Amino acid sequence: MPKYVIEREIPNAGSMTQDDMHNAAVTSCNVLNKLGAEIQWIHSYVTDNKIYCIYTAPSAELIEEHARESGFPANRISEVKAILDPTR
């Protein structure tokens, strides 16, 4: 299954409270459940003004559908071509 990095421009994302992040996660998961098992959220990285999400999905179009239905931006969707880490 292809893996994607989704860049979401969200001003002041790094200032979100734990409740804000929890509510966003619940909203995202509700839409994911509706879309089916083919799309999966792995985890996200929160920075000052962006959230970078890692997903697996059969296509970028399904990720775009998730973004539309959840109300979260998907400013850039990039398919992962390789993974590098210090052990390779």
Image: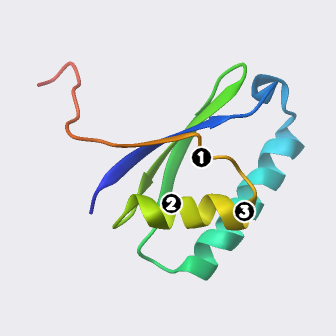
Give the residue number, with chain letter if any, for mark 1.
74
The quadrant holding residue 38 is bottom left
**What residue is rendered at 76% in x and 57% in y?**
71
> Where is 25 relative to 17, above or below?
below
Residue corresponding to mark 3: 70
Residue 46 drawn at (x, y percent): 65, 29
Gap between marks 2 and 3 measured at Cα: 10 Å
Q: Could you tell me if the residues under marks 2 and 1 are in contact, i.e. CB atoms within 8 Å?
A: yes
Q: Alpha-carbon distance for marks 2 and 1?
A: 8 Å
Query: Which residue occupies 78% across, 43% down?
Result: 21
Question: Can you say which quadrant of the picture contains the C terminus?
Answer: top left
Q: Which residue is mark 2?
A: 63
Task: Tell whether label 1 touches label 3 (CB within 8 Å).
Answer: no
Q: Amino acid at mark 3?
A: Ser
The tag earlier along the polypeptide, 2 or 1, is 2
Residue appearing at x 51%, y 80% in the figure: 36
Residue 33 numbered tag: none
Q: Report helix, strand or loop for mark 3.
A: helix
Which amino acid, mark 2?
Ile
* SS of the residue under disc 2: helix
Q: Nearer the viewer, residue 17 or 75?
A: 75
Quarter of the image with the N terminus is bottom left
Question: Circle 2: is it few (<14), some (14-19), or many (20+) Cα within 10 Å?
Answer: many
